[in-house]
Amino acid sequence: MEFDPALLARIQFAFTISFHILFPSLTIGLASWLAFVEGLWLKTGNETYRDIYKLWVKIFAVTFGMGVVSGVVMSYQFGTNWSVFSDRTGSVLGPLLAFEVLTAFFLEASFLGVMIFGWDRVTPRMHFLSTVIVASGTVISAFWILSANSWMQTPTGYEIGADNLFLPLNWVDIIFNPSFLYRLFHMVTAAYLTTAFFVGGIGAWYFLKKRHLKQARIMVGMAMFMAVFVSPIQIFLGDLHGLNTFKYQPQKIAAIEAIWDTGKDVPFVLVGWPDERTETTQFAVTIPYLTSLLLTHEVGGECRGLKSWPKSERPPVLPVFWSFRIMVGIGLLMLLTGLMAIVLYFRNQLFTQTWFQYWCLFMTPSGFIAVLAGWFVTEIGRQPYIVYGLMRTLEARSPVIGQHVFLSLVAFIFVYTFVFGTGIYYIAKLIRKGPSSKEKKEDIYGSHGLKTPRL
Amino acid sequence: MFDFSPFLNLPLLWGGIIALAVFLYVLLDGFDLGVGILFPFAPSEDCRHKMMNSVAPFWDGNETWLVLGGGGLFAAFPLAYSILFPALYIPLIIMLLGLIFRGVAFEFRFKASVETRKLWDYSFHFGSLIAAFFQGMILGSFVEGISVQGRGFSGGPFDWLSSFSLMTGLALVFGYALLGATWIVMKTEGISQEWARKVALYVLIYIAGFMGLVSLWVPFLNEEIFRRWFSLPNLAYLSPIPILTAGTFLALYWSLSKKRELLPFFLSLFLFTLGYMGLVISLWPWIVPYTIPLWKAAADTRSLSLMLVGVVLFLPFVLGYTFYSYYVFRGKATSQEWY
């Protein structure tokens, strides 16, 4: 049987990284929220905050554990599957990843232990500090990895040396490359919103089940605060990010909007079926002039179409086009949720309207889907390049035979489905059990606070 | 941009940093993998709880050294990273899958019902066992040498599989078991401790065998290694290593039979240190044995300089709060003082 090793390596990377990104999307937001909740508990002494913390820190621990093990795989996969890429970019990207390990991973790992198991072993202040440190670690980690990713999208500050290696010229230009800050803020905000809608959905479910009402009130209330104030910010950040992409990666934008011909009055395609063979969008529902207006912020601004690039320079259009619409659609639904929350709040019905609780429950996984869709847009949209404009994805792979990539891919699919499926099941179990105000014996075992036997 | 290469031998320094990261990984994850290897043989369920609890706060930090080793290799020696990882493709992937199973077992086991807990007990055990065995095989095939052409791996997909690498795989399993057993001796009391002590004594015999085997086998893999150890005056300079190793074995045996609680663990760490020194001496100066030396695989000196600043600034903190987390979860020492 013939296997295409390049295609398999791409599928394997897409599969493992898509699984991986789900966990940080939750842990980045959850860590900051936990720090906030614990701070409130210390300040007010209100035990409802403590109960919320104790429930969600367990969910955090499971999610974080899955993020760690799926992340270790990522750090080794550059070498196993993309060795030519590693060889050529090592001098530029390596330091960014090394800084991620040194400034974030160790910090998170060490204080995570204190955060999960140290409840009875350190003072409440120190425990709070540990949570804050872990939360900072998640954001620092995002800083470095998104800087590395952004450099691959918009490379600056490098020179090309012997053996075609990328060498560093200016670290500030490398780290703060043109798309980095947009991507960083867009992703961290996405993680916060993902967490908010996840937490809010669970809170709404408690309301529907008429359980843990005190805790549910805080969970839904805080989530809606985020929906009201942060989802508009996210849409604004997304727009900025899009304009930045328009400037530096015009092919990607052309694929996102399915623009085939360069023109000045480009209509916005609401939905449709872009067909790369005929270079047209079928069944298109369009709004005249809107794309020109959105991208150039002026009526009749010029947008470059896909046909102006040779076919070998174009990304796949269909997945980029649709992933973008899913992401934006969810963003708008989040905004809508915020608007509904405002109306209900002023009618004093925020915590009582059953239909709204069902709506929040429905929105529980929305952030995860939007994050995945967003990454699909940006990663498929920069194809056929792995380092934009400079190194093609096809040149980057390892000299490993197809069968082995295939076998390892199958192994990853089985293991991830089983292991992370079980993880999600345990999270569901924790949620079903809900926050408990009494410490039971099994909790003590689970929290590693074994008191009688010496640790 | 700054560049320290006129004043410092950066590739050498970075070779040292990577070697240190791998070494700390082996020591630290070594004992928690060892606990996993011994897990199903524990005398009681209560003992298993204690074993799990004794490593749960640390495993994540311990495994981060593996990420530093891998990520650091990518950053400091990208050429070595891009040759070694495809060469060791299969064992690396299997090792990572093993680490997944054992890593999630920590959290899942606490959440599982009593009936399904067994599943995660085995996941913890076999994950640890597989990770340890394949780490040993990776080490073995690394020592045997990697085929290289140009800037890429040129050997076959099963080059890593040999009688030597199978032997080093087993050796590392027993080595980690010793670290795990002496850790349990230190961290528990009563029947758990009694059992761990017996295990440590038993495992020690195997390790003596494996260390002897490796010491005899490695010099014959490569003429250069043979000359390094057995030519004069090297033989005299290097003789403290085997002598100290023999002494450490005796001290370990003595401390275990005298029922010391802390000493066996630290002597096991020292035993690993000696073995690791032996390896470093044998393999110097190769980063891809036996074709690419450290300085040929090194990243650009500007990259190494920047990262050196990072290491100098952050590694002391890393070591500091790693120590802090071990301090927070320290045990109550009774017969011996904790230092």
Image (spheres, coloured by chain):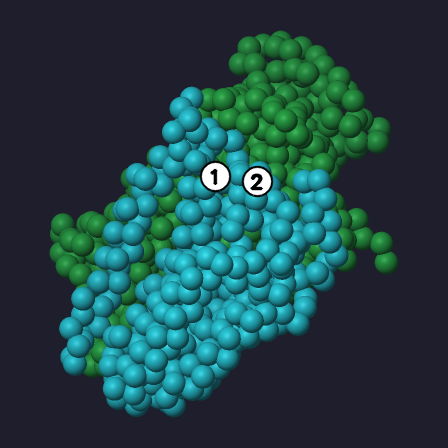
Chain colours: A green, B cyan
Asked if the residue under mark 1 is in contact with the one under mark 2, i.e. CB atoms within 8 Å, the reply is yes
Mark 2 and mark 1: span between their CA atoms?
8 Å
At a point 25% along the width and 86% down the height, the residue shown is: B258
| Relative side of B140 to A355, left or right | right
Quarter of the image that includes the C terminus of chain A:
bottom left
Q: Are marks 2 and 1 on the same chain?
A: yes
Determine which of the numbered discs, if any, sits on residue A50 in the image: none
Query: SS class of the residue under badge 1?
Result: helix
Residue A330 horizontal/vertical position (percent): 52, 40
User: Please, which chain is the residue tagged with disc 1 on?
Assistant: B
Left or right? Give the position of A289 relative to B320.
Answer: right
Of residues A401 and B15, the one drawn nearer to the viewer in this rendering: B15
Tell me which numbered mark, 2 or 1, is placed earlier along the sequence: 1
Residue type beneath disc 1: Pro
Q: Residues within 10 Å of mark 1 (few under 14, many from 20)?
A: many
What kind of residue is marked 2?
Ala
Percent position of residue A10, x then y:
68, 46
User: Would residue B286 be found to the left or right of residue B198 on screen?
Assistant: right
Q: Which residue is mark 2?
A: B297
What residue is drawn where x is 66% and y is 54%?
Answer: B146
Image quadrant holding the N terminus of chain A, namely bottom right
A37 w.r.t. A261: above or below? below
Residue A398 in sight: yes
- At numbered mark 2, what does the secondary structure look like: helix, strand or loop? helix
10 Å crowding of disc 2: few (<14), some (14-19), many (20+): many
**Residue position for label 1:** B11
Q: In percent of the image, x 78 and y 22: which residue is there?
A: A310
Give percent across and percent down for residue A92.
Answer: 52, 32
- Residue ID at (37%, 88%): B198
Chain for disc number 2: B
Q: Is B34 left, or right, of A107 in this rendering?
A: right
Task: Judge by depth and name the residue closer to the eye, A179 or A37.
Answer: A179
